[in-house]
């Protein structure tokens, strides 16, 4: 990597710290772009499939599920979007919009535009507004545009409970993002087991950073207790045995071959 690229990365990192938006009402101005059609259907950084017809965006540091009001400073048209991806990767741009979002503020023809982004909801604080809500000039967001939060239901007992509103329900195998998986080869290498799904997800992300990219969470029961098994790979039984030593070398000393559900 040459010196210019290193300097550019440093500037991007420093600027993201200095100008980071952290709370409801924070605003920032800069340049916006939008996704090319070729990204439609591809996975975003939070595990969702990108939908060019939806109202989402990419931001470098705001948490996923942050809601933003994005205003085109050229015409004062605005749209509400939700963060579900990382980017843009050009230092002078602050946000990448879906094509539908860019169309709402008449930015498609120009390709890029100067915008103001305002935080409406972040880290459980603020008000979620229906994505795609839009306006211009003196138009404002009304209470009719707010997303009504559902009243929590009575907590079920342990035997019938599921994690994360239906994700990781036993028995089943999931990605660390909670997506159900149907595996072809039948075996993997169990690395660890947890009683708390959040700990299993955190451990799965750490395993990714260690170079174990194909990680699954097997949700099941053990002695009438709900467990979440961290498993590497979708392999034949023979291949699973071959890679067990590799998994152990990453710090999972008790790793062993495990059949997928």
Image (cartoon, rainbow, N blue to C red):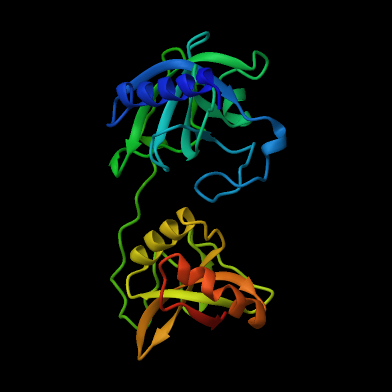
Give the mark count. 0
Q: Is residue 216 visible?
A: yes
* Residue 4 percent coordinates (x, y): 52, 17
Quadrant housing the C terminus: bottom right
Q: Residue furthest top?
A: 74
Residue at the image position 42 percent from the left and 43 percent from the top: 65
Residue nearest the observer in this picture, 159 or 154: 159
Residue at the image position 49 percent from the left and 81 percent from the top: 256
**Which corner quadrant of the image does residue 185 belong to?**
bottom right
* Residue 58 percent coordinates (x, y): 51, 33
**Which corner quadrant of the image does residue 194 belong to?**
bottom left
When the figure is inspected, residue 173 is found, relative to residue 256, above or below; the finding is: above
Quadrant housing the N terminus: top right
Residue at the image position 48 percent from the left and 10 percent from the top: 73
When the figure is inspected, residue 204 is found, relative to residue 185, above or below; the finding is: above
Q: Residue furthest bottom?
A: 223
* Residue 137 percent coordinates (x, y): 45, 12
Residue nearest the observer in this picture, 7 or 180: 7
* Residue 78 percent coordinates (x, y): 48, 21
Q: Is residue 173 visible?
A: no
């Amino acid at each position: 990597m040459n010196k210019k690229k290193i300097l550019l990365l440093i500037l991007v990192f420093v600027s993201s710290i200095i100008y980071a938006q952290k709370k409801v009402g924070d605003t920032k101005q800069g340049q916006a772009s939008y996704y090319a059609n070729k990204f439609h259907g591809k996975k975003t950084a939070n595990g969702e499939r990108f939908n060019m017809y939806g109202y989402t965006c990419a931001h470098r540091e705001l948490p996923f599920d942050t809601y933003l009001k994005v205003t085109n400073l050229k015409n004062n048209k605005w749209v509400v979007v939700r963060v579900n991806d990382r980017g843009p990767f050009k230092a002078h741009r602050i946000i990448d919009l879906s094509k539908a979002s860019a169309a709402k503020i008449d930015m498609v023809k120009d390709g890029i535009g100067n915008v103001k982004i305002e935080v409406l909801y972040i880290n459980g604080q603020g008000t979620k507004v229906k994505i795609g809500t839009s306006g211009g000039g003196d138009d404002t967001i009304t209470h009719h545009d707010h997303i009504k939060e559902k009243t929590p239901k009575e907590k079920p007992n342990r035997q019938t409970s599921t994690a994360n509103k239906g994700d990781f329900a036993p028995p089943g195998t999931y990605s660390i993002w909670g997506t159900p998986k149907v595996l072809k080869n039948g075996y993997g290498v169990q690395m660890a087991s947890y009683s708390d799904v959040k700990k299993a997800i955190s451990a799965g992300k750490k395993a990714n950073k260690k170079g174990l990219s194909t990680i699954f969470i097997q949700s099941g029961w053990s002695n009438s207790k709900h467990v979440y098994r961290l498993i590497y790979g979708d392999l034949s039984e023979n291949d699973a045995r071959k890679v067990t030593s590799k998994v152990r070398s990453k710090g999972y000393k008790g790793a062993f071959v495990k059949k997928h559900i």
